[in-house]
Amino acid sequence: MSVYRALQDQRLGLTVVLAFFWLLVVRLCLFLQSGVWPETGWLLLSDAAGAVTVAGLLILARSFWLRTALVVALGCLMTASAMHLAAHGTYPRLSMISKGADPVFLASSVFNSQLLMLPLYLGLAWLLVRIYRWLVPIPPRRITFATLLVVVTTGLYLAASHSLTTSRNNLVASFLAQIPMALMAPAGALVGEEVADTTAPERSQAEREFFEADVASPDVPEPPNVLLIMVEGLSAGYFPSVSEYHELTPVVSLPELENKLAETGFRLYRNTLSMERQTDRGTFAILCGQYPDFQRLSTKMRDVANGEAFPLCMPELLRSHGYTTAYWQAAPLSYMSKDRFMPRAGFIRVTGSEAFERDGETPEGWGPPDPIYFANVAKRLRALDQEAPRWMVTLLNVGTHHPFDTGGKQASSEQGEPPLPTEPLQARRNAMQVMEQSLIAFLDEMDQAGVLDNTLVILTSDESGGFVRQDQESFPLNGNTGVLAVKPPRPEALDEYADRDRIVAQLDIPLTILDATGTSKPMIAMTGRSLLSGETSNPRDLLLADTYTGMKFFLRESGELLACTESLLRCETWTFEPGRLFGTLSPTDSEPFLTLAQRLRLFGESARMPTGPSVSSE
């Protein structure tokens, strides 16, 4: 009866109504700061659940210190959510707090102008508490009931949500719902590994399809140089022809760069998959030809850096065949252990932001803006081309990473404004357009200097910023819309490469480079398919994930996609046209084409790496 009487208490109703309207104001603030508008179909229902949760928290905060703690917690949560929405289109994940505490990350991505919004959000939280104290001068003394209200609502929210971090969620309810999953994650991972090891000792043919390598192993009389350009956060969706092909609306348009690629003989692939989000995950797949980390915390690059795993990566294979290998990035090398990983992956020359020191001081934030970065690496690349008979260089800029530092430079021309709210996204758009102009100038300079005369050039991205869609919450693979453009050393050689509508992935890049340089082996220990391999009648299967939404995917190139929650317990089946992947995704009522045991086993297998030293072969 006490629960019944509590529900009849008018003070509870007033508190829920107050919390609901307060959360709508929060929605508006987050939208004005980030420019990300959530799917409205679930917005009110999500905030209704959040209002019940906030009401319970207000009832529990009876003392001054508890009210102060609630104000600080809500203010910090709103600030972090707005920043993450602006950078990635999702709310932050509780499990990534440890990564966010990294000094480089704090100095580069947290301590920026957006942090000035913290006093506003603290004031908004304080206003909630003050209005509550005015509306309910005598709060109900129902501590047990309020606790039960928060726990039950959070539990129901967790059970009903496929992803807790997409923008349609209520930031308070979704954050609290992440707590049990964060606590259970280690135990869940152990259970998953046990299931993967015991349910079926031998993988079926259907499972082996996810780990196959397909190379052409051609005879290459004159191996070319290799220039691999990774642009931070770039998506093929930002190129007009690709977004129009898939009938999608990107937040950025880069027509000048697309025209330059077409004029200089690049083939731009229209169905490119990025395996995961975050730089270390994508970089590992691109360099080592193996699946990246699909678990919450990324460990593969760190394990290699610490000498605990020994994959044989593409740069090491090229180095063993006489290539001078170099990795030049703009960001600090110590972040994500790249200072130790890159030499172990096979790079001889490795530099980061310290290469841009002036008067003993390194650039602030993530590193030099793109105009400075590309001008600097252009000089170094010209010198290397004169010095080394064969070279492989990998570049990674940082100007297109949040908070989108362009060194004060503005794009010289304004592109057409997309139909979505754009002002909060102007920093991203300007950074991408400054990168566009800097990269075009870099390619022109390298071409005029003759550096690209006998060079395979590949343009890709460490990860994908993805499309911004009117109905973006309804579609999987938003964070996996990658980019791949290829220019072989001889224009006529482009006929040997895969058609532009073939489904390609980051995993295909190292195998393509090894094929193009004549260093691939038929039984190479990698996963992927070289762009030089012929068309086959057997479509392949791929594993993908989006760590920001907590979703995992099983893709069959024949036209099926299984989109699952992070636990792999709940899945939805989608279909698509193989030649138009992103533009034709459609949900179906079909049963999952993989069992739970198979799903667990596949992702368990993707986490394994060689633990003994690898030996490169001449």
Image: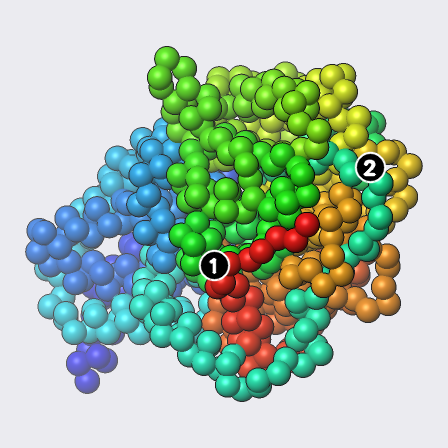
The disc label shown at residue 222, or none: 2
How far apart are the two marked residues, 2 and 1, measured between alpha carbons? 33 Å
Q: Is residue 38 something that shows in the picture?
A: no
Residue 458 image point, x, y percent: 71, 38
The disc label shown at residue 59, or none: none
Name the amino acid, label 2: Glu
Residue 581 or residue 438, whichever sits in front? 438
User: Relative to residue 232, is residue 77 depicted above or below?
Assistant: below
Please give the name of the residue rendered at 52% of the width and 71% of the height, measured from the top-left corner. 604
Query: Is 218 positioned to the left or the right of 137 in the image?
Result: right
Q: Residues within 10 Å of mark 2 (few under 14, many from 20)?
A: few
Please give the name of the residue rendered at 60% of the width and 58% of the height, measured from the top-left corner. 290
User: Relative to residue 93, is residue 360 depicted above or below?
Assistant: above
Q: Quadrant of residue 47?
A: bottom left
User: Relative to residue 202, is residue 602 depicted above or below?
Assistant: above
Name the amino acid, label 1: Ala
If you read the primary sequence from the N terminus, does the residue marked by circle 2 or circle 1 appear first? Answer: 2
The disc label shown at residue 309, or none: 1
Residue 316 image point, x, y percent: 60, 46
Q: Secondary structure at mark 1?
A: loop
Instruction: Report the number of numbered marks.
Output: 2
Tags 2 and 1 touching, CB below 8 Å = no
